[in-house]
Amino acid sequence: MNSSMEKIREKIICHLKSDATTDPRHSSPREFWTALSRVVMGALSEHWNETDALYQSGRQAHYFSAEFLQGRSLLNNLINLGLYDVVRQAVASFGFNLEDLEEVESDPALGNGGLGRLAACFMDASATGDYPVTGYGILYQYGLFRQTIENGFQQEQPDTWMEEPYPFMIRKSKDKVRISFHDMDVWAVPYDMPITGFSSKNVNTLRLWKAEPLEPFDFAKFNAQQFDDAMDKATRTEDISRVLYPNDSSYDGKVLRVRQQYFFTSASLQNIIRRYVERHGSDFDQFAGLNVIQLNDTHPVIAIPELMRLLMTEHQLDWEGAWAVVRKTFAYTNHTILGEALEKWDISIFQFLVPELVPIIEKIDARFRQEAAKAGMGGEEINHLAPLGNGQIRMAWLATYAGFSVNGVAALHTKILKNKTLNGFYRLWPEKFSNKTNGVTPRRWLRLCNPELSGLLTELYGSEDWVMDLDRLAELKHYAQNDDVLRRLIAIKHNNKVRLADYLKTYHGIEVDPNSLFDVQVKRLHEYKRQLLNALHILDYYFLLKEHPETDLPPVTFLFAAKAAPGYFRAKAIIKLINEIARKVNRDPAVAGRIKVVFIPNYNVSKAELIFPASDVSEQISTVGMEASGTGNMKFMINGALTLGTCDGANIEIADAVGDKNHYQFGCKVQDFGPTMSFYNPQWQYHNIKGLNRVVNALVDGTFNDSGTSMFQDIYNGLLHGTNWQPADPYYVLGDFDEYRLTRLQVLEDYKDEMAWARKCWINITSSGRFSADRTIREYASDIWRIEPSELT
C-alpha cells in the first residue's frame, strides 16, 4: 500500500462516498471509523492472501479454541503495519482525533477470560514469528454478556457488539460447510479476521464460524400464518452461535453447549480436510505430517471422534487407518485441575445430537482399556481413567489418551498433572507430557497499552527490537540503580493512573485519587480466585482505620473487575458483597482520602488496557494449586506492578525471575496444602484470629444488605459450616486471612519509599522476558507442532 498521507486521505474519502454516501465534513465518527478501518483492511489484504497461499505448501498448526479475546483491531493493526503516525496525521487533516476514533470500536465479544486472552496472545505471537498457525472458533453474536451493576448486583445484558458491521472481518460464503445433527442440519459460515504480526509482512487468519439455517424460514408454515413455527428452526440454528457458554445448569443448556462444540470443530475439520484434498488428493498418508491440531482446553475435544467419522464415512479410510491419523494429529492443552472444568457429558446428549460418534467413542474406550490392561494397569484405575464411565464421556481423558501431546501451562501445574490429575496416563505414556508456561504478547500488553513506558524502554535500549524479543529488556536491568530513570518511571505510572482515573470519572462517574496506591484484582469471578479473601481484608482494613486513625499508611484504592457466570450464585453474591463494602467505605467521611473501593463493571480487553499500566499491586491470590498459570499476573508484571500472591501457577516462576525482594508471597506451598486441609477447621481461625470474626459476622449481622436474597448468609455458611456437597471453606479463605493481612500491610509500608518501590517495579519489567508469548509459541512450534517459520519475502 502507498502509505503517504495523501493516498490514505484519498482512500478514506473513497470509502465514505461508496459505503456511506457521505464525505469527511458530514460523516459521523462511526462512519469515519468504518471508512478508516476499510482502508486498513485494504492495506493488509494482499499480504493476507499471499500468507495463506504460502502456508498451504508446508506443515501447519490449527488452533481450536472456544474463545479468542482479540480486543480492538484498529490501533493494533496500525501499529503492526507501521501506519500509526501517518494515519494519525491523515485523520487529523479531516478534523478527527485518532484516539477518539479508537473509542468508536466495540470489543469483539469472542471470549470470557484468560483462556480467550491467551488464545489471542498466541495468535499475535504466531503471526509476529511468521509461524503457519490458523485459529478456529465461533463467531458469537452476543459473546458472554454485558455486565451492569444495579444496586450492587450483577445484571446480564446482551453484548450487542455486532449491531453494526465489523469491518475487520470478512464473510467467506464459498467456504461454508454443512453440519448435520440428528435433529437438524445447519450451515457453518466462516468469517475471517486478519491477524497481523509486528514488523512482519505475514498476515495470519482467525476463522470464526457462524450458524445459519439451510432455509431462512418455513414458507408453508408462514403462509399458513403459523409465524412462530415458521421461524422455529432458524431460531434454534442461530442459538448455536448466539452466546458464549450458555448456562448449562439445565439439561437443555448442556445440549446447547455440546452442540456448539460439535458445530465449530466439525466445520473446522471439514475445512482443513477440504484444503488438504485440494492439494494432495484422497491419500491421507501425509495428513498428520502436514497438519497438527491443538485443542485449547476440553471444549474442542469432540473433534477427535469427529475426525474419525469424517475419515471413515466421507473419505473411506478403515478404522485402523483413521485411528493412525488421529493419534498423530491432536495435541491437548490442559488449563485446569478443577473437576468442574474437566468436562464430562452424559452419553445421552451425544446419542441425541450426534449418534454416529457414540460407537466411535465406545471403540476408543475399548482400545484404551485394552492398552492399559496390557501395560499392567489394574481394573479399578482403568475404570477411573477410561474415556467412558458412569454413563459419561470424559473429555479430558479422551484428549489425553487419543492425543500425541499433553501440556500444562506452568511448571507447578504440569507437575500436578503428572503427579496427580493425569498421573495414570503419565505412567503409561510419559513421553506425551511437557510444560509450556503461558505468555502474553508485549505488542498489545506493553507497546500498545503503555506507550510512555514503551517509549522509555525503546529510548534506553536504542531500538524497538525488544518488542519482538522481550528477553532483551534484561540488558536494561542496571537502570534500577539510576535515579533519573526511576523518576521517569514514577511519572509514567502516575500519568497512567490519571488516564484510568479520567476514564472512570467520564464513563462510570467514579472518582479515584491517582496519588493513591492502586491495588488491583481483575479476573473472572470464581471462588478459587478468592476475591472474597480480598474483600474481607478490605473490610478489616477499614475497621483498622476507623479504630486507629493515627495509622501511618499511604492512601489506597482497591480496584476490582470481574464477571461471574449467570448461574454461579455464590460468585454473584461476592460481587454484591464487594459493592456493599464499597458503598459503606466510600460514604464514610472518617476514612475519606485514605481508602476507596471500586468495582469496574463489564471487564474486557479495552478496560484491561487501561488498568494494567495504572496498577501498583497485582492481586494473584488463588488457592494454592488451583490456578494453572494465569496471564494477568504477567501483564501486570511487564507494566511495572508488583505481585502479591500465593505460591501458585506462574506466580512461582515470576518470583523466581524477579527475586525474593521484588514480589510479595504468602501462604503454604502446594506440597503442604493437602496435609493442611486434612485437619483444617475454619472455626478455629474464626474464633482465634484477631478481627476475623468481626468481618465474617458482618455478612449476617446487618452491616450489609443483600436485599433479602440470603446471598450473604450463603457465603457465611460456606465459610464456617459447609454444605452437603462441600466442606467448610474449601478454598482456605479464613486459613490464609492473617498471613495475607500481614503481607498486605507490608506492601503499604514499603510503598512509602517511592524510589525503593520504583526499583522493584523496574526489576519486574526488565525480568519479564520469559513471560512473552513469543517464547511460548517458539516452544509449541519446536516441541509439539514441529513447524518452521514461513516468511513472506
Image (cartoon, rainbow, N blue to C red):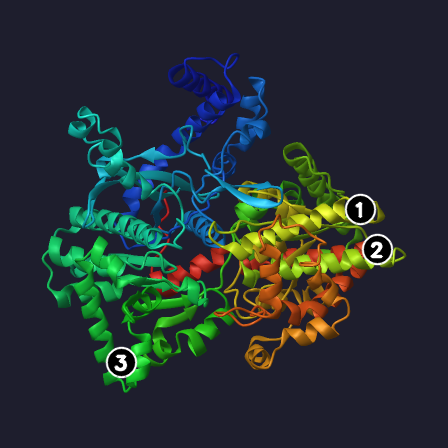
Residue 546, numbered label? 2
Measured as percent of width and height from the top left, residue 354 is found at 21, 55
Q: Is residue 606 above or below residue 340?
A: above
- Label disc, if present, on residue 48 of the rendered structure: none
Query: SS of the residue at dot 1?
Result: loop
Residue shown at 26% from the left, 63% from the top: 347
Give the Cα separation between the discs numbered 2 and 1: 10 Å
The numbered disc on residue 372 is 3
Position of the N terminus by quadrant: top left
Judged left or right of residue 479, residue 299 is: left
| Disc nearest the viewer among 1 and 3 | 1
Give the number of the mark in front: 2 or 3: 2
Distance from label 2 to label 3 (Cα)? 63 Å
The alpha-carbon separation of the residues under discs 1 and 3 comes to 64 Å
Mark 1, residue position: 588
Q: Image point 37% across, 35% down: which residue?
A: 169
- In the rendered image, residue 449, in percent from the top left (x then y), is placed at 59, 42
